[in-house]
Amino acid sequence: MAVQVKRFSWVRSQTAWEQTQRWQERRTQMRSDFESANQALLNSFATATTNVIQGQGTLAAEQALARIQAATKAKTDTTA
């Protein structure tokens, strides 16, 4: 009994040059995708940091205003 391997000879396989070109195209696309995702992540961190700083500034301003109002009320209560 003989084993025969049939080949589809009408389908041309890629040359080494073509394989290298396809690989470089895929690598270029992967790098572009990575850089896009990385930039989006950096933007998210920058936004989060800005929000934290603004929130802390708002809290500090509100505390300062409360202290000033309390001091003003204390002075007006003692003079009245």
Image: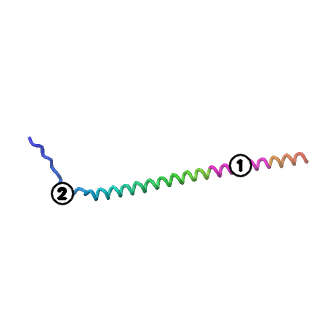
What label does residue 50 carry, if any? none
Q: CA distance from mark 2 to mark 1?
A: 76 Å
Residue 36: image location, x then y, percent: 46, 55
Q: Residue at x 84, y 47 (%)?
A: 73
Please name the residue shown 33% across and 55% down the image: 23
> Could you classify mark 1 by the number of other residues whose Cα lies within 10 Å: few (under 14), some (14-19), or many (20 or more)?
few
| Residue 63 included in the magenta stretch of the image | yes
Residue name at image x 87 percent, y 46 percent:
77
The amino acid type, in three-letter code, at marker 2 is Trp
Closer to the chain start, of discs 2 and 1, is 2
Q: Is residue 14 left or right of residue 43?
A: left
Q: Main secondary structure of the magenta part?
A: helix
Return the x and y of residue 18 as percentages of the image width and height: 28, 59
Image: magenta residue range: 52-68
Which one is in front, 3 or 17?
Answer: 17
Numbered label attached to residue 60 = 1
How many numbered circles are shown? 2
Q: Which element is circle 1 on?
A: helix
Q: Is residue 58 magenta?
A: yes
Which residue is situated farthest in the left direction here? 1
Please tell me which residue lies in front, 48 or 15.
Answer: 15
Q: Which amino acid, by three-letter code, is at mark 1?
A: Ala
Spot the residue most to the top: 1
Q: Quadrant of the N terminus?
A: top left
Q: Residues within 10 Å of mark 2 (few under 14, many from 20)?
A: few
Q: Identify the residue position indicated by label 2 in the image.
A: 10
Q: Verify CB contact (< 8 Å) between mark 2 and mark 1.
A: no
* SS under mark 2: loop
